[in-house]
Image (spheres, coloured by chain):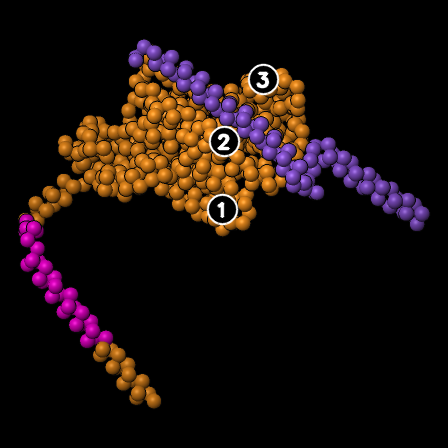
Chain colours: A orange, B purple
Amino acid sequence: MKNIIIKLLALFVFIGFGNAYASDAAHAAPEHISTHQEETYQARPFSEMIGGFLASTGINALINPDPNELNAHDEPMSDFHKTWGRVIMILVTFLLFWLAIKKGFEPLLLLPIGFGGLLANIPVAGIAGHDGFLGIIYTMGLSNQLFPILIFMGVGAMTDFGPLLSNPKTALLGGAAQFGIFGTLVGAVALAEMGIVDFTLKQASAISIIGGADGPTSIFIATTLAPELLGAIAVASYSYMAMVPIIQPPIMKALTTEAERKIKMTTLRHVSRIEKLVFPLMVLVLAILVLPDSTPLIGAFMFGNFLKESGVVDRLSDTMQNALINIVTIFLGLAVGSKLAADQFLVGETLAILALGIVAFSAGTAAGVIMAKIMNLFPGHKINPLIGSAGVSAVPMAARVSNKVGMEYDRSNMLLMHAMGPNVAGVIGSAVAAGVLISLFQ
Amino acid sequence: METNLVVEGVKFMFLGMGTVFLFLIILIFLMNVMSNLVHKLFPEPQANDTAQANSSANNDNKKVIAAITAAIAHHRQQG
């Protein structure tokens, strides 16, 4: 028995050696041939090879920029944007990482955007160019507006219209908050008229949509009307959405009295399943009749919501809420990040966009609160004006802020579900506003 | 073209806010009509239609709880 085992082992060892030897020979043979066949490669002295390698390093590209290097749009770039601009932008992306990780500012989007920006500012590699992978992702789904639409689908599948259906008139608050968009539009063109900034009407519209506080809508409009400003608009939009708990409360407190903040709202009535099922179709039909330009956004939104409320396709609605929206978020973030290239982001307009964005946000918040106060002048159930600020979309952050501020003044006053009504109406409102802007430029 | 940019912006604002409000006001009207229809055509027995119904249900519950506690107290006194 032992003998047999030893013989078998010896056989295996022999076969193994034989194979190894054979494969060595097989490897050696093609290599030998390929060095002869490769005609483009020419032997060079070692010092020249080192020199060539040093010329291809990132350090060299940052110190001695290639005068013929073009940006992602095949336009020449200034030396500043090729050298210090890239260093500054890489530091800016580190700032975004810090905000996302340490401060918890919308990490789901700021991390992919920031990393995309980091990759887009690498010299030589051209990752954000036509053939780079960021450039491919950008053309795949952002320049044709596919990604924001898919995100809207997922958001629709996550949205519950119950609070809005049980108190329909709160939809007006979501409408009033869209003043943030159009008020800022007037402000931006007025600044342009005075010669302080240089924006066209299209660019001003794309910037002011930040006031809708709706990331996908901002990106949708920016890619349609002013793709050159996309990076700054997306970054401003998502940063301010993350800063809702800081920006909104002072405005809400300044515009309301203590008595108003303590108003208790009547309990929300039960909403039947059929109502929730009919609602998305009703909104879509209304959008078809009134404003077909808004139907890409509203259609996708209501598709997601309809699948969720139907209750028979939980698998699909679950995919939209989780897997699909997560995948698209990665792609959307990276594609937006590719627009953080120094030559597109480090321009004077970016500062103006950031400034106008926060004005738009604040104006929307204020308009929602004021609208609630106006509605309280009419007979009927009183509305706590704190929920007016939730009319800017930013679901569900803005509604949580309303709830939190309300509880500061009366611990038993739960405003969260009441604020969800204007909050989801705000999403519909900003999609309608987006449709209006698109229809005006056709 | 250059001179009336602000006027254009104001026009955009009125048209935009007008459309948004028109859309939402029609939507509010439709929501009310729809929920009335749904409640007439497909009444849900367990649904509490109004806040009043809700509070009266709560009151009923409280009365029941009060009755039970009174009965327990009475029983203990007897025992």
Asked whether, in this view, residue A314 is left or right of residue A80, the answer is right
Front residue (pair B32, A160):
B32
Measure the alpha-carbon separation of dots 2 and 3.
26 Å
Q: Which residue shows up at 90% across the image and 47% down it?
A: B75
Q: Name the residue under label 2.
A: A286
User: Which label's residue is closer to the chain start, 2 or 3?
Assistant: 2
Measure the alpha-carbon separation of dots 1 and 2.
24 Å
Q: Is residue A22 magenta?
A: yes
Q: Can residue A207 be seen in this view?
A: no
- The numbered mark at residue A317 is 1
Say which quarter of the image contains residue A137. top left
* Picture quarter with the N terminus of chain A: bottom left
Q: Which amino acid is tagged 1?
A: Ser
Q: In this view, does A269 lie above or below A380?
A: below
Q: Which amino acid is tagged 3?
A: Ile
Q: Name the residue under label 3.
A: A374
Chain letter of mark 1 equals: A
Chain letter of mark 2 equals: A
Q: Position of residue A312 (x, y in %)?
A: 54, 49
Say which quarter of the image contains residue A266. top right
Q: How crowded is mark 3: few (under 14 residues within 10 Å), some or many (20 or more)?
A: few
Q: Position of residue B65 (x, y in %)?
A: 81, 41
Q: Which residue shows up at 67% across the image and 32% down it?
A: A267
Q: Which amino acid is tagged 2?
A: Leu
Secondary structure beneath disc 2?
helix
Asked whether, in this view, residue A181 is left or right of residue A57, the answer is right
